[in-house]
Image (cartoon, rainbow, N blue to C red):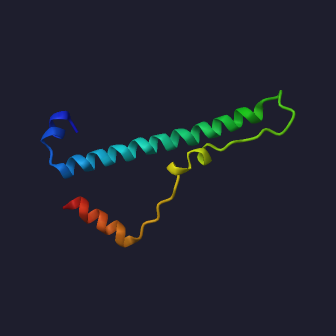
Amino acid sequence: MKPEEYWNARYKEAILYCNVNLFKITDDIKRNIELFEAVTDKVIMSNSMCVKKPKFVKLKEMFGNLFKKKEQTIEEQIKMLRRMKS
């Protein structure tokens, strides 16, 4: 959405654009967290100087509120789609 389209858009369209953009940003953050977690685990395991078993702190546990599964029923999904269309 271009800036002039944003300012001339209806309130519902602007909110929808912001929500979609927010979803895209959080999805990118989740993907980066998963990637960094895999890389750091491999780096820690490949460290030959470490004699003891290393302690892994899962990033998914640290950022647990980002990875909560939101269960939606079919009726809730239909309601959400109808609100978006109108």
Q: Residue at x 62, y 40 (%)?
A: 37
Residue 58 percent location from the top left of the image: 65, 44
Residue 54 percent location from the top left of the image: 79, 38
- State the residue lying farthest toward the left: 8
Q: Quadrant of the N terminus?
A: top left
- State the residue lying farthest toward the top: 49
Residue 80 percent location from the top left of the image: 30, 63
The answer to whether 75 is drawn above or below residue 68 in the figure is below
Q: State left or right for residue 2 relative to residue 31.
A: left
The answer to whether 43 is drawn above or below residue 82 in the figure is above
- State the residue lying farthest toward the right: 51
Q: Quadrant of residue 35?
A: top right
Q: Residue at x 61, y 42 (%)?
A: 59
Q: State left or right for residue 10 relative to residue 42.
A: left
Q: State left or right for residue 41 relative to residue 47.
A: left
How many numbered markers are drawn? Answer: 0
The answer to whether 37 is drawn above or below residue 61 in the figure is above
Q: Residue at x 48, y 40 (%)?
A: 29
Q: Quadrant of the C terminus?
A: bottom left
Q: Residue at x 64, y 40 (%)?
A: 38
